[in-house]
């Protein structure tokens, strides 16, 4: 069975003068998928998103959202967006902003429902200016959901928010995903990505260097991290069999290994005074870091 | 399922809410609302009433025409120039462009706000002229004047748009202020252009404000030395250039 395609892109390029920000991106996202775009600042994420949102024309290649060109009215009616840095008009009240955006869409989410979902019911009479950073972000989220979108673009939606608010936000996203909304997320928080995204698309130097299910990407670097306080110096640890890398801050040492039993017995015998021993599975962050380091960003 | 065609929405509702939002924003932003209204009134009181001297009624009537044009100029230039630059640079305009809002609603609402503020200024100026300047005017005569003045907002709204779609948030107020002041003074909106040296009177022809002032004067019965068609043509040409610039800058704004 072929699920309908929500987003497709082929051979996308974007030049800004001499800068080649997007260098041949192909992407297909199925309806209902939750995809995270990962990449360092300047990797081309925002340019790619801007093309998909219809804000920027591609220099080359083509893209489609729900079967039509990005930026077309039919597409805009089915998408919701949270941009990375937006200030809404300070002087308007939460309810006024939300009502305004609802009026743009053919089948908006009911006002009370929308306010309740985004936790704004009690804040609806407040001016945007009078809200905290987290509350302002919630208003922006409400605007993204105002039209009952089938595709949701979220560019760094939780940046600067505290953990509690981020978790509330995740819960809403999971509900939306369960109802079949396609979600494209960029975030610097890997815990967020690991908790939410089905699939990761890693971008480096304007190219996709990895595109796979979150679980598969995590598995690509299966190793263990041995963390301990030891008097052994970095060089002698590095010389041990099975050690992949060593990171040392003061006496606190992190050893990446694919043979933890051998390394553990070796360091324990060499340093009986070793303390605070901890063995961890490698994280998503390790996997992504390894992929970014391996890739030169050149086409393979 | 038809995935290509869009669904019709109640666009009257969009226009209404956009206009309402613009008015609320302006009213709740004293930095905008107060100078926009107070500026022309204070200057009119000084030049048109207090300093009018013997020529009293004639001066009050003359300057009602040009200060009305000045009163419309402010909200058009600032409402578009400064506010659009702001909203473009802080992402609000991007968010709206991505949304299904028709851009015409955005522009119409800003024009509606500028005209509303312009109209308030014209009303207050008229009140001052009636009570303190000995103005006598028929309703029909006044309606013609006010309509003419309000129509002259359009070229400056377009000029504001051309600026707002291009310059930075920081630069916009400075640029707009300078244009606003220079064009007002040298276009003869503060003092009758006939008081200026001849060179400046000739140079004034290059300013759109001169033409909007002359049209306002003609509308209230000051026979212009040149036919009104010339001023209408000049403002139309200016509007066309500004519209083209605004359209170009809008297309380039995300590049």
Image (spheres, rainbow, N blue to C red):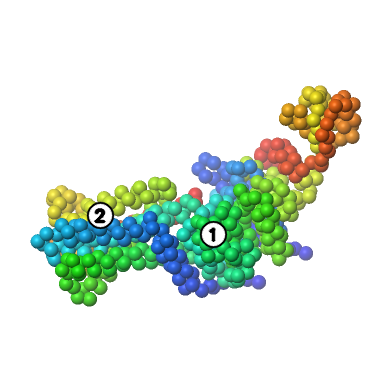
Q: Mark 2 or mark 1, which has the lower sequence index?
A: 1
Q: Nearer the viewer, residue A232 or B200?
A: A232
Image quadrant assignment for residue B21: bottom left
| Badges 2 and 1, same chain | yes
Q: Can residue A53 be seen in this view?
A: no
Q: Position of residue B35 (x, y in %)?
A: 33, 57
Compared to residue A155, the image places residue B112 above or below, namely below
Residue B158's place in the image compared with A248, above or below, is below
Mark 2 Cα within 10 Å, few/some/many (few <14, many 20+)?
Answer: many
Q: SS class of the residue under badge 2?
A: helix
Q: Where is residue B68 in the image (x, y as percent from the top left)?
A: 25, 63
| Chain bearing mark 2 | B
Q: In this view, does B104 lie to the left or right of B214?
A: right
Pointer 1 chain: B
Q: Which residue is at 33% across, 63% downward? A: B154
Q: Which of B7 and A245 is in front in this view?
A: A245
Q: Write the residue at 70% across / 50% down.
A: A192
Q: Is residue A24 left or right of residue A270?
A: left
Q: Please give the name of the residue rendered at 59% of the width and 49% of the height, measured from the top-left corner.
A: A46
Residue B184, numbered label = 2
Task: Residue A237: name its quadrant.
Answer: top right
Q: Where is residue A281 in the image (x, y as percent from the top left)?
A: 81, 42
- Tags 2 and 1 in contact by the CB under 8 Å rule? no
Separation of marks 2 and 1 at Cα, in angstroms: 37 Å
Could you tell me which secondary element the residue under label 1 belongs to?
helix
Depth order, front residue of A90/B231? A90
Quadrant of the snapshot with the N terminus of chain B:
bottom right
Please tell me whether residue A166 is drawn above or below residue B111 in the rendered image: above
Q: Mark 1 points at which residue?
A: B98
Question: Residue B86: percent from the left, percent from the top?
Answer: 44, 53
Is residue A34 something that shows in the picture? yes
């Amino acid at each position: 069975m072929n699920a309908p395609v929500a987003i497709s892109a082929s051979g996308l390029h974007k030049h800004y003068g001499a800068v080649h920000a997007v260098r041949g991106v192909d992407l297909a996202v199925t309806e209902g998928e939750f995809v995270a775009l990962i990449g360092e600042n300047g990797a081309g994420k925002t340019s790619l998103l801007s093309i998909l949102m219809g804000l920027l024309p591609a220099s080359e290649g083509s893209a489609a959202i729900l079967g039509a060109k990005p930026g077309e009215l039919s597409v805009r009616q089915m998408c919701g967006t949270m941009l990375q840095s937006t200030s809404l008009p300070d002087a308007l009240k939460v309810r006024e902003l939300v009502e305004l955006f609802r009026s743009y869409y053919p089948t908006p989410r009911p006002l009370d429902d929308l306010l309740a979902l985004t936790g704004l019911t009690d804040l609806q009479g407040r001016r945007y200016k009078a809200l905290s950073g987290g509350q302002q972000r919630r208003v922006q989220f409400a605007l993204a959901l105002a039209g009952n979108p089938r595709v949701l673009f979220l560019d760094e939606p939780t940046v600067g928010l505290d953990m509690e608010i981020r978790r509330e936000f995740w819960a809403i996203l999971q509900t939306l995903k369960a109802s079949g909304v396609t979600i494209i997320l960029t975030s610097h928080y890997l815990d967020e990505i690991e908790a939410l995204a089905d699939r990761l698309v890693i971008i480096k130097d304007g190219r996709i260097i990895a595109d796979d299910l979150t679980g598969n990407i995590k598995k690509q670097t299966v190793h263990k991290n041995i963390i301990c306080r030891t008097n052994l110096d970095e060089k002698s640890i590095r010389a041990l069999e099975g050690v992949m890398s060593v990171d040392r801050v003061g006496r606190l040492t992190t050893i990446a290994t694919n043979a933890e039993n051998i390394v553990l017995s070796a360091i324990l015998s060499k340093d009986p005074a070793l303390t605070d021993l901890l063995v961890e599975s490698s994280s998503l962050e390790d996997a992504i870091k390894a992929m970014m380091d391996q890739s030169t960003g050149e086409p393979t | 399922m038809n995935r290509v065609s869009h669904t019709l929405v109640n666009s009257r509702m969009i226009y209404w809410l956009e206009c309402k939002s613009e008015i609320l924003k302006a009213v709740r932003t004293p930095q905008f609302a107060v100078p926009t209204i107070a500026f022309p009134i204070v200057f009119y009181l000084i030049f048109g009433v207090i300093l009018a001297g013997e020529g009293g009624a004639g001066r009050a009537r003359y300057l009602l025409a040009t200060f009305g044009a000045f009163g419309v100029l402010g909200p058009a230039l600032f409402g578009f120039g400064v506010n659009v630059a702001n909203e473009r640079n802080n992402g609000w305009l991007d968010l709206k462009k991505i949304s299904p809002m028709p851009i015409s609603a955005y522009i119409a609402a800003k024009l509606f706000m500028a005209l509303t503020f312009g109209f308030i200024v014209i009303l207050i100026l008229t009140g001052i002229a009636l009570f303190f300047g000995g103005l006598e005017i028929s309703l029909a005569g006044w309606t013609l004047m006010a309509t003419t003045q309000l129509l002259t907002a359009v070229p400056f709204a377009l000029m504001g748009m051309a600026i707002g779609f291009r310059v930075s948030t920081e630069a916009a107020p400075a640029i707009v202020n300078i244009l606003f002041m220079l064009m007002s003074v040298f276009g003869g909106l503060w003092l009758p252009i006939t008081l200026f040296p001849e060179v400046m009177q000739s140079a004034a022809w290059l300013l759109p404000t001169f033409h909007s002032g002359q049209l306002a004067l003609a509308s209230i019965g000051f026979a212009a030395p040149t036919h009104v068609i010339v001023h209408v043509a000049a403002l139309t040409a200016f509007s066309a250039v500004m519209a083209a610039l605004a359209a170009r800058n809008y297309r380039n704004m995300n590049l």
